């Protein structure tokens, strides 16, 4: 049974692999982190909010937190690392990629245990266990494919099941296409839309999350993916649509039924449903991901149907989507070289093909840096900024465990890209050279462009659902491209250099400023920012810490990138705003790193030299490591083969913080 | 769906899948009718299957005209496949070879479920690798951190080590000092409780972990150190972050696993190991049916 299924699936699998790989994103609004220069104390946001159940809830519950503390509790908050986007066999696409892992495997992997990859090898975290994790199977048809493939289950007798698990690739592709088409169109196939089965699978996912939750050690969330796709045009050619996927996860208790695209393909309806659940005490957040392949639809300037945005809808989005997953296996969505021509580090793990197609996604509307700027313009037009989100990253692994390390990479879609040859990083058939090799076009366009990313970082007092979830709502979050780089970021009108050597630096920073995700109110004085980054000891030392400033001038989204502190004593040139190169290099013959350059930690207090008190702006931090080998180079090195000539041999791993917003009067 | 299908026919990946499909279908037909290579028998079951796919893609039953079109398309494809096979176009095609090899690999792997062994077998196996299953030694420690960024030196870190030694001398003379108030701000914790060497390797790098877990004064007699339980000063250790002055607060020696308590884990590892061996053996058995001659020098 086991091997037969596998063999049957092989043919159809490749096509399907690219169809649905969606991820998470979360966004939160929290206890107000607003500071003014009128007083040195943190003040509560004076601006009245639109009736906001979240602020009310948090304001009501926060002081009560003071009861039982778990080990590791810290009032100045710890960095917790997690993965909020992982699929198992209960996802209709993962099952076709021959994935048989369960939500239990997701949690076992997160704890540092070894699990099996569908291509027949073991996978395990290279670093310490994750602090928090969520299995996020596609909500639509959750658990239906395993049932269709189970002898004795009523769904197994359907013609569609016979086709799906036949030996005929055309039939497999057609049957899979039916399901994929239905997920995207939102029109269910009655014969396989077994609500009871989906509810039971969802309940088992909730049970698994609850079973593995160990306060103080591992935080789990009940979660699933809402798999919406916009259509590029009205022809119904939905395979080449814009990815509007989100992961929805619940703070603690979860409802009996999930809301999938089979309920509505309009994400605004998802927010309505989440509002209703919240009113009943079931708080959740939705985290969009892969805006890079949203065809410009994730952060567009209108609502879902193309009408003008309103303050009410913007507030609704922000309430439900306080953070965004901006880096994962299918590319990094910070910015695009075309949007950021003056940012020499913008070309990082760019992936642009719409799901399972070779159609290139529209750039405008697809990247978070531009969206953060456009948010100010939407705020000017409507009174509310819908794109005031924080940042995280996640894996979007479809094999129950994320590949975060470049030197131990297994990509995403099970048997389809589970070997170096399948993902196109080494020449086929054990060849050692790419000379005269006809490249597999899909490996070229898809798998070789995917990346070993990423991790979500949350600053929280302790490792509990309450604390981690609140950190996400507060947007006190950061994203990394895989390494465990830790980064602090505070804004204030009351910081100076002496803070950097203070033993209680962080206590002071919280007392006199706001952390990442917070707000600074209008001032005549330029705010100061404390930035402090620490390397991952398993990876390369740090090269530099930058601050990216974004704003909108009423016509265009604007941005400026500043080096704030660099390794090896380099100082930014006031004109170019850049430090020189630190000379770090990689020996491509063995991926070893040059010595004597780079820093273990970098910190500074920085002021915006171009501060304009009349201009609202968002500031976020980007930390850059010294270069290291990309996974494709490691794959080739291990195989003793020539590395792929078209792929970047090295990359600069990085971390990004959520912004701090300055609001002009 | 129909338009998806039409559009996807331009996609090379689809070409590749369909090529595979065509090859397999062609092979099946060829096998059945090889006595009469110029007769194409279209079975009722085949047309029913085509109709089912059509209905799935178009959300309606096919009309007679649709069926006719399906039939023609099927015959066209079948003829093309047969002609391609006659001309040997399937041989030497990299993609087809790779796919066939992959399919065969799936056929021979994991054919039989490896059954759990008896307790006696499992126990004997466990005893040869007991250290894989036990609880490792655990340490609790506090450290003072000095950052090379805050104590730059031109001579390969000499200054920072000198400073660390001086600070070490100062603090170790007074166990009552609150160590967390010394040194530079450190982003990770200044105090760790009950961590293993692996934990520390992940957090502070391999050299720091090794140094931390090495007995302090008597590297040859680890028992002596491990029997110490009270706090003691370990000294100055460097890590990828910089330099640390370390005090060990407590330690727990490694504990061997009891077979009974880890039985399930041992069994899973045993099954995984045997499955892997069986798969390798299956492939080896196939390879042994062949004589391999490698031409040319070397």
Image (cartoon, coloured by chain):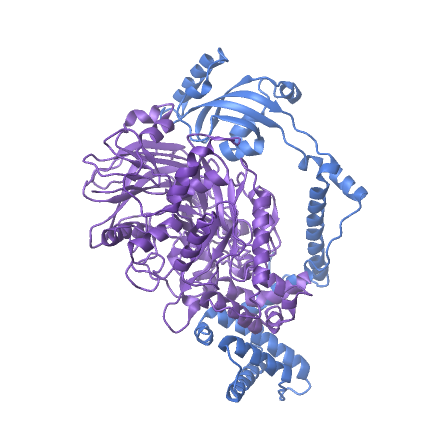
Chain colours: A purple, B blue
Count of labels in the image: 0
Residue visible at 65% across and 19% down in the picture: B227
Q: Is residue A406 visible?
A: no
For residue A95, what is the image quadrant?
Answer: bottom right
Q: Quadrant of the C terminus of chain A?
A: top left
Q: Is residue A417 above or below residue B231?
A: below
For this view, does A510 lie left or right of residue A155?
A: left
Q: Using the image as rendered, state which of residue A641 and residue B8 is in the foreground.
A: B8
In the image, residue B149 lies at what x, y percent? Answer: 36, 28
Q: Is residue A653 above or below residue A462?
A: below
Q: Is residue A347 above or below residue B5?
A: above
Q: Quadrant of the N terminus of chain A?
A: bottom right
For residue A536, what is the image quadrant?
Answer: top left
Residue visible at 34% across and 29% down in the picture: A511
In the image, residue A416 lies at what x, y percent? Answer: 54, 60
For this view, does A207 lie left or right of residue A277?
A: right
Q: Using the image as rendered, state which of residue A575 and residue A269 is in the foreground.
A: A269
Q: Is residue B225 above or below residue B205?
A: above
Q: Is residue B57 visible?
A: yes
In the image, residue B7 lies at what x, y percent? Answer: 43, 73
């Amino acid at each position: 049974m086991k091997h037969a299924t596998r063999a049957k699936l092989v043919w159809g699998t490749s096509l399907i692999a690219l169809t649905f790989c969606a991820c998470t994103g979360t966004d939160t609004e929290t206890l107000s982190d607003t500071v003014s220069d009128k007083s040195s104390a943190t003040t509560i946001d004076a601006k009245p909010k639109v009736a906001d159940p979240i602020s009310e809830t948090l304001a009501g519950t926060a002081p009560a937190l003071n009861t039982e503390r778990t080990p590791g509790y810290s009032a100045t908050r710890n960095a917790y690392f997690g993965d909020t986007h992982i699929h198992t066999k209960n996802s209709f696409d993962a099952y076709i990629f021959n994935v048989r892992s369960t939500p239990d495997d997701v949690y076992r992997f997160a704890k540092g245990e070894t699990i099996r990859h569908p291509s027949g090898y073991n996978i395990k975290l290279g670093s310490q266990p994750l602090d928090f994790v969520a299995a996020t199977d596609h909500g639509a048809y959750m658990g239906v494919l395993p049932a269709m493939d189970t002898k004795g289950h009523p769904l197994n007798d359907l013609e569609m099941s016979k086709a799906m698990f036949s030996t005929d690739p055309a039939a497999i592709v057609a049957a899979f296409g039916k399901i994929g088409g239905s997920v995207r169109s939102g029109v269910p196939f009655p014969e396989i839309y077994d609500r009871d089965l989906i509810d039971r699978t969802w309940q088992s996912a909730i049970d698994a999350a609850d079973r593995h939750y160990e306060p103080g050690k591992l935080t789990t969330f009940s979660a699933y993916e809402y798999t919406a796709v916009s259509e590029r045009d009205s022809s119904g050619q939905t395979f080449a649509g814009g990815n509007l996927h989100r992961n929805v996860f619940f703070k603690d208790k979860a409802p009996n039924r999930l809301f999938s695209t089979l309920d509505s393909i309009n994400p605004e309806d998802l927010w309505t449903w989440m509002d209703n659940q919240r009113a009943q005490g079931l708080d959740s957040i939705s985290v969009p991901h892969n805006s890079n392949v949203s065809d410009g639809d994730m952060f567009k300037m209108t609502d879902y149907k193309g009408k003008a945005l309103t303050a009410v809808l913007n507030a609704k989005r922000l309430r439900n989507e306080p953070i965004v997953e901006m880096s994962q296996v299918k590319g990094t969505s910070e910015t695009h070289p075309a949007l950021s021509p003056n940012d020499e580090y913008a070309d990082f793990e760019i992936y642009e093909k719409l799901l399972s197609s070779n159609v290139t996604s529209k750039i405008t509307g697809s990247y978070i840096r531009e969206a953060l700027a456009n948010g100010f313009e939407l705020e000017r037009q409507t009174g509310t900024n819908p794109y005031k989100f924080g940042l995280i990253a996640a894996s979007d692994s479809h094999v129950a465990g994320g590949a975060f390390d470049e030197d131990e990479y297994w990509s995403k879609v099970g048997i389809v890209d589970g070997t170096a040859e399948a993902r196109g990083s080494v020449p086929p058939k054990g060849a050692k050279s790419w000379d005269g090799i006809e490249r597999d076009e899909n490996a070229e366009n898809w798998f070789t462009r995917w990346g070993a990313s990423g991790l979500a970082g949350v600053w929280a007092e302790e490792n509990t659902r309450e604390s981690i979830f609140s950190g996400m709502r507060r947007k006190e979050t950061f994203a990394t491209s895989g390494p465990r780089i830790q980064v602090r970021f505070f804004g204030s009108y009351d910081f100076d250099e002496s803070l950097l050597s203070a033993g209680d630096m962080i206590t002071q920073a919280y007392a006199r400023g706001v952390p990442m995700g917070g707000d600074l109110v209008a001032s005549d004085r330029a705010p100061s920012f404390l930035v402090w980054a620490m390397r991952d000891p398993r990876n390369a030392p740090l090269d530099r810490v930058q601050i990216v400033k974004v704003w909108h001038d009423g016509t265009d989204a604007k941005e400026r990138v500043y080096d704030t502190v660099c390794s090896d004593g380099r100082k930014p040139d006031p004109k170019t705003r850049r430090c020189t190169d630190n000379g770090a290099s990689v020996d491509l013959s063995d991926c070893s790193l040059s010595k004597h350059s780079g820093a273990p930690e970098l910190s500074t207090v920085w002021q915006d030299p171009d501060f304009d008190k009349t201009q609202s702006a968002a500031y976020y931090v980007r930390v850059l490591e010294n270069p290291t080998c990309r996974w494709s180079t490691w794959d080739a090195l291990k195989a003793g083969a020539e590395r792929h000539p078209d792929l970047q041999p090295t990359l600069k791993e990085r971390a990004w913080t959520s912004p701090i917003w300055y609001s002009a009067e | 769906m129909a338009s998806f299908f039409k559009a996807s026919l331009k996609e090379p990946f689809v070409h590749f899948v369909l090529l595979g499909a065509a090859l397999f279908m062609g092979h099946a037909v060829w096998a059945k009718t090889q006595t009469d290579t110029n007769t194409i028998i279209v079975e009722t079951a085949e047309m029913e299957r085509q109709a089912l796919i059509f209905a799935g893609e178009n959300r309606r039953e096919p009309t007679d005209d649709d069926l006719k079109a399906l039939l023609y398309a099927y015959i066209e494809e079948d003829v093309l496949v047969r002609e391609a096979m006659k001309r040997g176009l399937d041989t030497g095609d990299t993609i087809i070879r790779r796919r066939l090899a992959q399919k065969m690999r799936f056929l021979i792997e994991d054919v039989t479920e490896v059954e759990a062994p008896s307790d006696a077998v499992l126990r004997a196996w466990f005893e040869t690798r007991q250290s894989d299953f036990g609880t490792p030694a655990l340490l609790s420690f506090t450290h003072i951190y000095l950052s090379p960024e805050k104590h730059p030196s031109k001579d390969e870190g000499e200054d920072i080590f000198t400073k660390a030694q001086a600070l070490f001398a100062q603090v170790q003379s007074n166990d009552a000092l609150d160590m967390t108030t010394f040194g530079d701000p450190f982003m990770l914790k200044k105090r760790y409780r009950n961590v293993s060497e692996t934990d520390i390797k992940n957090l502070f790098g391999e050299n720091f972990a090794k140094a931390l877990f090495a007995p302090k004064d008597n590297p040859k007699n680890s028992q002596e150190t491990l029997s110490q339980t009270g706090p003691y000063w370990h000294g100055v250790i460097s890590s990828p972050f910089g330099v640390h002055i370390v005090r060990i607060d407590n330690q727990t020696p490694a504990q061997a696993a009891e077979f009974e308590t880890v039985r399930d884990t041992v069994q899973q590892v045993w099954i995984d190991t045997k499955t892997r061996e069986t798969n390798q053996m299956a492939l080896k058995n196939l390879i042994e049916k062949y004589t391999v001659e490698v031409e040319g020098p070397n």
